[in-house]
Image (cartoon, rainbow, N blue to C red):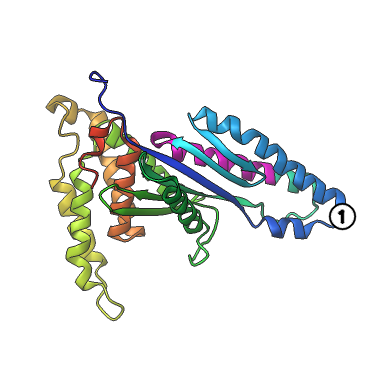
Amino acid sequence: MAQYGEPVPYGVLLKADGDRMGELFAQADNTTQSINISDALHRFASDVRAMIREFGGHAIYTGGDDILAFLPLHRAILCAQKLANHFTAAMNAVIKNNFNKPQMVAPTLSVGLAIGHFVQPMRQLRQRAIAAEKHAKGNDEQAPRNALAVHLGIRSGHEITWRCRWDDSTTLDAFSAFVEAFSQDLMPTRIMQDIRNMAHQLKWLENENGPDVSDIRRSELERMLVRAAFAHNHTTKERESGEMQGRIHTLKEHLRTQASRYSLDELANQLILARWISAKTAKDIGGED
């Protein structure tokens, strides 16, 4: 342990549920179609335990499209994404083989991930997982369902939440890039607080009847990106290499894109979660703030 450092004292409870399954069963015109849908759900549930084990997790419950499982922090999102892809593929197959309705949309899987400290009571972690799954369903969102939601409960009392649809490849790619950048020490951890501070400083400009502050926000973001010390723990030679400069440029483009699509508070939450997902030891999550 002295050689590798203290392990991260946080884990993940995954809670997932299929979207619009009732609508699919309602489309069944006969008993055979209903049975085939149920069989497809059973086969999916049978595959879930093995898939979760691939990511070092343990399935607590798998019943049709309903899943509850424990997962290690650093592999939870990858597992959630694989489950969602597998579920949609299974539903697409049952629709193709049983319905002559090209316009039918396959059910999807909404997944909530609750991150909590190992000493946290299970009841509290389960309540966070229920809230995360509800957030993923997003009945009040402009684009509900087919989403991932992550709720992080930091032991100091903070709650960080983030939601992303599974079909939003731009954001998922950016998040993966942020995780990799934190894990390889390319992204400065200070950037999360810098963006949070920027959001606070510009908050007074944002109201329904106020001016468009997008240009101001872009200018402030560019100032921050110029000051940010990307790859500061790498050697000067490494930082100045073409490969490293290219990767830093790509990271900045991801940050610009995410800042244009989401609020600065939402971007800060995304970065905080990326840092936590990237953590290999307790030291990597710092003061848990």
Q: Residue at image x 60%, y 51%?
A: 108
Q: Magenta stretch: dominant SS?
A: helix
Residue at the far top: name it: 3
Q: Residue at image x 32%, y 54%?
A: 159
Give the residue type that dot 1 points to.
Answer: Asn
Front residue (pair 200, 47): 47
Front residue (pair 219, 74): 74
In the image, residue 5 above or below residue 116 = above
Side (left or right) of 86 relative to 264: right
Residue hosting label 1: 30
Taking the image as drawn, is residue 274 in sight?
Answer: yes
Taking the image as drawn, is residue 103 in sight?
Answer: no
Label 1 Cα crowd, 10 Å radius (few <14 / some 14-19 / many 20+): few
Residue at the far bottom: name it: 209
Relative image position of residue 172 (x, y in whole percent)? 43, 45
Is residue 37 a member of the stretch shown in magenta?
no
Front residue (pair 241, 227): 227
Relative image position of residue 205 (x, y in whole percent)? 21, 72
Q: Residue at image x 39%, y 45%?
A: 115
Q: Residue at image x 41%, y 49%?
A: 171
Relative image position of residue 168 (x, y in whole percent)? 47, 51
Q: Residue 278's quadrant in the figure? A: top left
In the image, residue 218 above or below residue 39 = below
Quadrant the N terminus occupies:
top left
Side (left or right) of 160 relative to 114: left
Relative image position of residue 214 (x, y in whole percent)? 26, 66
Side (left or right) of 111 relative to 250: right
Front residue (pair 192, 154): 154
Side (left or right) of 230 relative to 265: left
Segment tinted magenta in the rendering: 72-91
Tag 1, which secondary structure? loop
